[in-house]
Amino acid sequence: MRDDITYRVLVNDEEQYSLWPAHLDIPAGWRTEGPTGTQAECSAYVDEAWTDMRPRTLREHMDAH
């Protein structure tokens, strides 16, 4: 990752997170969530928000059984 560009935080339907260069189009299946800023700012948000690395459907399945 580069320190000289602005990033945004993306999340998909499985509640998996990614940092994405803000100047690029958002890929299909992803949406913005959280800050737009430096890599460090966006990474800090992801560290706080993504506390369970399992995909959403797996968490739901495991919780049901």
Image (cartoon, rainbow, N blue to C red):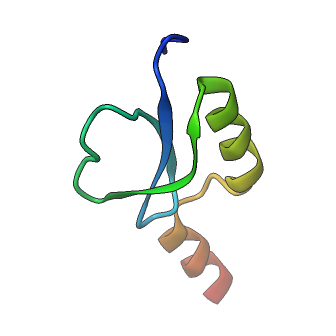
Query: In the picture provided, is 23 more to the left or to the right than 49?
Result: left
Residue at 68%, 33% in the rendered image: 41
Front in this rendered view, residue 7 or 60: 7
Spot occupied by residue 42 in the image (x, y as percentages of width and height): 62, 37
**Quadrant of the snapshot with the C terminus:** bottom right
Whether residue 65 appears in this view of the structure is: no
Query: In the picture provided, is 51 more to the left or to the right than 36?
Result: right
Spot occupied by residue 17 in the image (x, y as percentages of width and height): 52, 48
Q: Is residue 22 above or below residue 4?
A: below
The residue most toward the bottom is: 64
Spot occupied by residue 29 in the image (x, y as percentages of width and height): 28, 59
Front in this rendered view, residue 15 or 8: 8
Front in this rendered view, residue 60 or 44: 44
Q: Is residue 45 above or below residue 62?
A: above
Residue at 48%, 26% in the rendered image: 6
Residue at 45%, 64% in the rendered image: 14
Q: Is residue 38 above or below residue 49?
A: above
